Amino acid sequence: MGFYNLTKSLLFSLSPERAHTLAIFGLKHGFVFSAHHEDDPVLATRLWDMDFPNPVGLAAGFDKNAEVACAMLAQGFGFVETGTVTPKPQAGNPKPRLFRLTKDQAVINRMGFNNLGLDIYAQNLKRRGRLGKCGIVGANIGANKDSEDPIGDYVTCLERLLGAAHYFTINISSPNTPGLRKLQGKEALDELLSRLVAVREAATEVTGKPPLLVKVAPDLDAGERKDIAEIVMKHGMDGLIVSNTTIGLRDQLKSQYAGEAGGLSGAPLMDLSTEVLADMYRLTQGKIPLIGVGGIQSGEDAYRKIRAGASLVQLYSALVFGGPGLVRTIKRDLASALKKDGYTSVTEAVGADHKTL
């Protein structure tokens, strides 16, 4: 935390995207020290036959090309989600496309799935394996902007990456790829999940049959939420990630770049994303594990997500303002909150707010 405070002024003097590139470079080449320490046992949780040392994960978007998963796990995350990756490399949207909203502790991005493509991504994931599989790493998959068969893009990614990641996230909720959110519609989602489940079920013993998760937007109305819950339960999805960035919530923002187009993340998203999370927990009757994302800045925020129905949580935007040391603070305060309420594990607290209604 102290080291980040020393470098924060330098990073903030750069454009957000240049600062991010510098951070990736530093992590990749060992210039960022490990913050590894023993997690409190109360934070340990088991899900999908995997043991998570703690429930606090890094959300997709930071490590788009799966270059620094091990380095970020060494910062104390319980798991890291890499990507979003698309079959073909793509530059993404024109710059500038990433904006810090410091007064609001928020970020707006319209990156547009910029990444180096499936070949390099797959190589990087395999390299992680050769380093000794440093922890739980997920792969977030998407479609190319110019694709004539978006569903086929997801199939291509999953087929290529089977055996290289511990779980897969089907990202159909980014607001920055035209038409992508249409895949959240009932018929399109039904077809998409049918094809992906078929790929997973045809997997060999070598690659295994990894969990498939669907990442949804926070801007869903009641009918859309109900439809998604119905379809993911129909296809036996292993989890939902709630939520991606929002195209709304602009009215109360105070920062210079509040009017920029793109998806909003960070503190302003906390209430909306948690409300959608709680609703999806209710609609799926607590039968599908949920990962809560959106606005987490503290252990109290993480605990609120868990009580609303999240088995795991993820963050990214808060790191921009708090640095990697924030992870340790969140875990410490989450452990204290769990113990204060008499819980001996994260699992016991999942959905607690629904049980007291």
Image: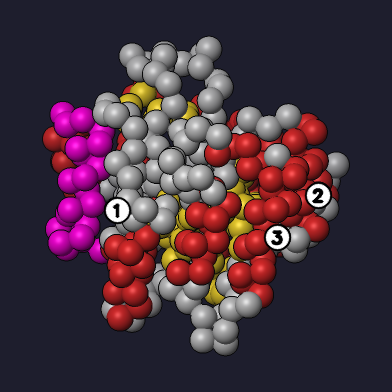
Q: Determine the residue positioned at 51% across, 38% down.
A: 174
The CA distance from mark 1 to mark 3 is 28 Å
Residue type of the residue flagged with mark 2 = Glu
* Mark 1 burial class by Cα count in 10 Å: few <14, some 14-19, many 20+: some
Q: Which residue is mark 1?
A: 116
Q: Is residue 19 magenta?
A: yes
- Residue 308 position within the rendered picture, expressed as x and y whole percent measured from the top left: 70, 45
Q: Determine the residue positioned at 70% across, 39% down.
A: 185
Determine whether label 2 and label 3 are within 8 Å by CB.
Answer: no
Q: Determine the residue positioned at 49% across, 62% down.
A: 156
Mark closest to the chain's N terminus, 1 or 3? 1
Front-most of residues 133 and 197: 197
Q: Is residue 348 left or right of residue 51?
A: right
Q: Is residue 1 above or below residue 27?
A: above
Q: Is residue 342 left or right of residue 17?
A: right
Front-most of residues 271 and 188: 188
Residue 194, numbered label: 3
The part of the chain drawn in magenta is 13-37
Q: Quadrant of the C terminus?
A: top right
Front-most of residues 142 and 1: 142
Secondary structure, mark 2, is: helix
* Mark 2 burial class by Cα count in 10 Å: few <14, some 14-19, many 20+: some
Q: Is residue 145 left or right of residue 224?
A: left
Q: Is residue 149 magenta?
A: no
Secondary structure, mark 3, is: helix
Residue 230, numbered label: 2
Residue type of the residue flagged with mark 1 = Leu
- Residue 340 position within the rendered picture, expressed as x and y whole percent measured from the top left: 63, 53
- Residue 64 position within the rendered picture, expressed as x and y whole percent measured from the top left: 35, 52
Q: Determine the residue positioned at 47% across, 61% down.
A: 157
* Mark 3 burial class by Cα count in 10 Å: few <14, some 14-19, many 20+: some
Mark closest to the chain's N terminus, 2 or 3? 3
